[in-house]
Amino acid sequence: MAKKSVYKDTLEKNHPGDEEFHQAVHEVYEDIMPTYKRSSAYKTSSILTQLMEPDRILRFRVSWQDDKGSIQVNRGWRVQYSNALGAYKGGLRFHPTVNESILKFLGFEQCFKNALTGLPMGGAKGGSDFDPKEKSEAEILRFCQAFMSELYRYIGPHIDVPAGDINVGAREIGYMQGHYLKLTNRWEGALTGKGETWGGSAGRIEATGYGLIYFLQNMLEAHDGKLSEKKILISGAGNVALHAAEKCLAEDATVLTVSDSGGTLYFKDGLDETTLKKIKKIKLEEYGALKDVKEGSYKKGKSPWDIADADIALPCATQNEIDKDAAKKLVNRGISFLAEGANMPLTADAQQHIISKGIIYGPGKASNAGGVAVSGLERTQNASMAPWTREEVDEKLRSIMADIHDRSVEHIRRSDGIYHYRKGANIYAFTKLADALVAYGIK
Ligand code: NDP
């Protein structure tokens, strides 16, 4: 539990019951409080209060027609959290668990993540409580069009540039981009994550997973380690998880698990490239389930941490997937590094437990920033009308992840021989955001 402090009453008063949002704010504010207290300008500008209030929250009804001809109604949101450092930027998530608290936490995190990339991007997040599971292709198309019929009013290349997130991949971005074109008649970079042949960046799809592994390699090198031959537990079997797995295999590491909402697929001797290709097809192209994969052994209802000992854990599914009990399991499994592919996959007490046991911990706002970084590169390519090659993008991604690593340790010293990346990342990003807000006078 966070201590009673200057900001806590306001947070509780203005955002009652928004647990995920409170969790994200407390984590950051705990780390940045000494930095905040040292600056009279931050206090005069009420930076803590400014940063815990999104610029605006847009909420809209999304009505669409299902295959039986009935009208279905969902809720849609866009949380434009802060454009202090650039046009709003952040993904869209379609999942029945989506609510305002989750989108506010994700928007808040996104501001800090985007600040760490060094690219001019503000923070936002959006989505809907629409559940794409068991929906037909035509229903997904109609929903995406209905969603964009509302969202298009609020976005644009200099205003707000959404991308994908859980259940919003290349297919959904395609449907939304098509409808944006129809509604506005303007070809412009108003969405990222587009297909390579219609304005997308090479390497965007892989960027979050690959970037996670580049960040992990930087963490390992900073602690005299290397990735090859390490045993890795990955959770999730979506965009982030499977591209992280792909890069691990390319770097000769052993991937023991991937998981989805049904259970975990375990590979005692490590996942191989041919099987990974099959899993990618089933999960990313056919929207199927891991239980239908013939290779490996499927453990229904189990998490990776229930199954095998390993050196590294990469949670890549969703927020709060690791609670304190799961964190204890990870410690007992011999993990020495944990880097987050998902946003806030550890509960507050799980994080505390992992850090207190000396596990070197890479927070998502730093380690999974590769996706938004390449989204930033996609915007540059769209604006200049000059696409880059896959190799050029990958080189830039590697270099951005190395810079994020270095920025995350710029304001901290090693203690007990390890870096506290969370604190370093929070202080760096907070300082950038706070200095911009002070410079603006009143925004
Ligand atoms: P996907 O929708 O591609 O994959 C999500 C995966 O997580 C699926 O395997 C899904 O299983 C599993 N999952 C989702 N919810 C749960 C749950 N409650 N319990 C167990 N498994 C679950 O999403 P992404 O890979 O794009 O995103 C994963 C995480 O990474 C999210 O936290 C996202 O915010 C974060 N992220 C994504 C970025 C991106 O570029 N895509 C960028 C930065 C962060 P199933 O298939 O059964 O639903």
Image (cartoon, rainbow, N blue to C red):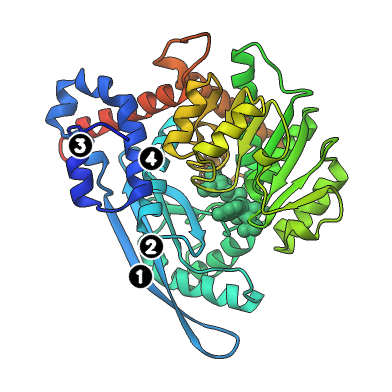
For mark 3, give the secondary structure. loop
* Structural distance between the alpha carbons of marks 4 and 2: 17 Å
Question: Which residue corresponds to the image point at 54% horizontal and 32% vertical from the top-left?
Answer: 367
Question: Which residue corresponds to the image point at 27% horizontal and 20% vertical from the top-left?
Answer: 35
Residue 77 shows which numbered tag? 2
Mark 3 burial class by Cα count in 10 Å: few <14, some 14-19, many 20+: some
Closer to the chain start, of discs 4 and 2, is 2
Q: Are marks 3 and 1 in contact (CB under 8 Å)?
A: no
| Quarter of the picture holding the C terminus | top left
Residue 111 shows which numbered tag? 4
Residue tagged by mark 3? 7
Mark 1 burial class by Cα count in 10 Å: few <14, some 14-19, many 20+: some
- Relative to 287, is 115 on the left or the right? left
Closer to the chain start, of discs 1 and 2, is 1
Q: Position of residue 253 (x, y in %)?
A: 77, 28
- Relative to 180, is 203 on the left or the right? right
Residue 391 shows which numbered tag? none
* Structural distance between the alpha carbons of marks 1 and 2: 6 Å
Q: Nearer the viewer, mark 3 or mark 1?
A: 3
Q: Nearer the viewer, residue 236 or 251?
A: 236
Q: Give the amino acid at mark 3.
A: Tyr
Residue tagged by mark 1? 60
Q: Are marks 3 and 4 in contact (CB under 8 Å)?
A: no
**Residue 42 location, quadrant:** top left
* Structural distance between the alpha carbons of marks 3 and 2: 26 Å
For mark 2, give the secondary structure. strand
* Structural distance between the alpha carbons of marks 3 and 4: 19 Å
Q: Position of residue 156 (x, y in %)?
A: 41, 57
Q: Give the amino acid at mark 1.
A: Phe
